[in-house]
Image: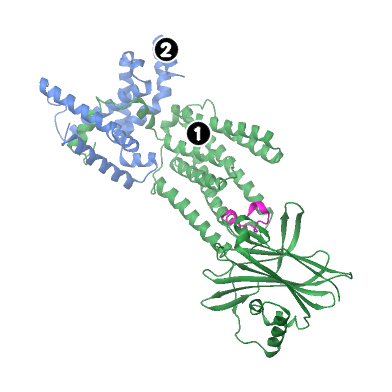
Amino acid sequence: MSDAELLERLRSHREAGMEALLAQYAPLLRYVICGVLRDPQDAEDCYSEVTLNLWQRLDGYDPQKGGLSAYLTATARNTALNHLKARLRREKHLAEQPEPQAPATPEQALLHQERMEQLKAAIAGLPSLDRKLFYRRYYYLQPVAQIAAELGMSQRAIEGRLYRLRQKLRQELGGDGL
Amino acid sequence: MNERWDEFDCSIATSLSELPPPEEAVREVTPFRDAIARIVLGLCLTSFTLNLWYLQYLLPAVGAVQIYLGFRALRNNNRWFRTAWFISICKAVSLYISFVLDATPFASLSGAVPNVWAAAFIGMTLALFLCFHFGLTQAAREVEQTPQRRPALWAAVWYAVLVLLGLLAPDIGWLGVIPMIAAFVCIVRSMLRVSEELEGFGYSVRAAPVRCGPGRVSALYLGSLLVMILLCAVWANHLPARGTPVPETVSPETTAIQERLAGLGFPEALLDRLPEEEIRQLSNASRCVVDSSETGAAGSRKGAGAFGFDTVYVETGPRTFRIYEFFHLNENALRSNWRMLAQLDTDTNANISNVTCGVFWTEDGIPYLSHPEIGSQIHEDFFFGPSTLPSMVFSYPFFSRDRGGYMAYDAQIAEDDWIYLCSVLRTYLTTYRNFYPYADLATDFFQTDWYAQSYSTCAIQPD
């Protein structure tokens, strides 16, 4: 079923449409989530949360802004990342909820915007294989073993390449953080 | 995002929530795309044969490695992919052995073997297509999906059509090429649809870990194959020259015959290169006729100037002659150290017997002589068709000098008023054209660059 047909079915028969969407895209959602969350129980919880998010927010999806698979990938990734952050906080015995942050000043917002532009330019300047590695590592948060297997390379080769990539980015972005 | 991540890594990962990858980058991040691309490329490269510029070896070798690398990544998913992986190993290994054997004389030991190899390769390729199809079907079934278009199965069907066309109508000509190209295009189209098909269920595939990257595997396979082929080709194209030093002194009897022959006009430089047993056959010599030329009477552009010829007719009895066809390599015969072929094209009117041959050269100032085996090989003549001629195949040691040789035979001429003899010696050098695959040296004028021949006639009025 094409994406347009899926969206049409979602609009006309929401429940059946959601079922069809998950039947088609569940492997993608699970693939993205399992890259970020290694614990199967965590991944399953996250998958339930993603489906709930989609049920609630899929109306907000605009096909003009990008493909459905990219939208689903972003939703699954961000939900899984939040799950991971929450788990890490729990492991470090920190408060369940982060400290409420003060709203950014206009200067901080401008600086952040500049750093994001820098990051965007740095990504654009990467060679094809490095860009693939970058997204797999920092966007999909995949482990080195998975990246190596899926690109048909040895873990050692991936680690070496990632190390050089990280050094290059650190140099181009000029610091420890964004 | 784990213990080994520092603040820099975490900040990049967090920032990317605001900077998601473009759609094409998202599409590239899959567990199957790289493996499937390799399999598709490999199967396409091994589905056809292009008999030019060594592509009949290069493309299947590259294709076999790609198929192996592709199925290596998928091998842990289901038994079909695992079977395909084993077949891909068998295919790569058998191709390797076959290509190396092609550099040696063993390639043509039996006429049946090439057909067995070809059948095995066709069978393996067909099995790969089918295992690929069943592997994809099972991968889809594991996530409760059904493949829609079955592209790998269609590719298998088109491959079978391609093979049948090749078997049933091998010499159909240009008209037959059209359905073959159409079948191949159908294979490629079907294979290109595999990736589309996998967008639905391919994310359930799990890539298997590997220890050696694709670049290293390809370099190891193709590099070692090239080295093995070159080593075997060098070994097969340079025959061992089992020469013995020419003795400095000969028996007084032989010396007497030599002096007599020299007196009759037999060139002394050539007499010195002949073995004693050959000279003794000329004890009854009564007449010598010599025909010398520093270049070939005919030959290819490079070859004609590379060889010089001397033909010596020695009358050894009534209407009986022993004819020597000497050849020597001039200094511009640069490729002289590989396999060479000399063929004797004798006068068809005379009764020919006692064919002998010898090859001589100088190494470190010492003259050597060897006696290659006399065999027979078909000579392809553009005008007169094929004929089987007495031949010798030999090589000179590397860096040897003063290279030459001879073929000799007795000719008994039937009763006639005039004695008319015609003798031809054809010589060929191995060149890049017939270096690989190993085969008998091409005697077709258009197939060899280094070819020259002598042509001499001898007309004598009977006493």
Disc 2, SS:
helix
Residue indicated by mark 2: A8
Residue B136 — which label? Answer: 1
| Disc assigned to residue B256 | none
The image quarter in which residue B6 lies: top left
Q: Is residue B41 above or below residue B380?
A: above
Residue B77 in the image, given as x and y percentages of width and height: 45, 39
As displayed, is residue B111 above or below residue A102? below
Asked if disc 1 and disc 2 are in contact, CB closer than 8 Å, the reply is no
The chain coloured blue carries which letter?
A
- The quadrant of the picture occupied by the C terminus of chain A is top left
Q: Which chain is green?
A: B
Residue plotted at (14% across, 23% down): A110
Label 1 and label 2: CA atoms lie apart by 29 Å
Where does the image place residue A120, in percent across and percent down from the top left? 25, 29
Left/right of residue B107 with respect to residue B456 in the rendered view:
left
Name the residue type under label 1: Leu
Output the chain of dot 1: B
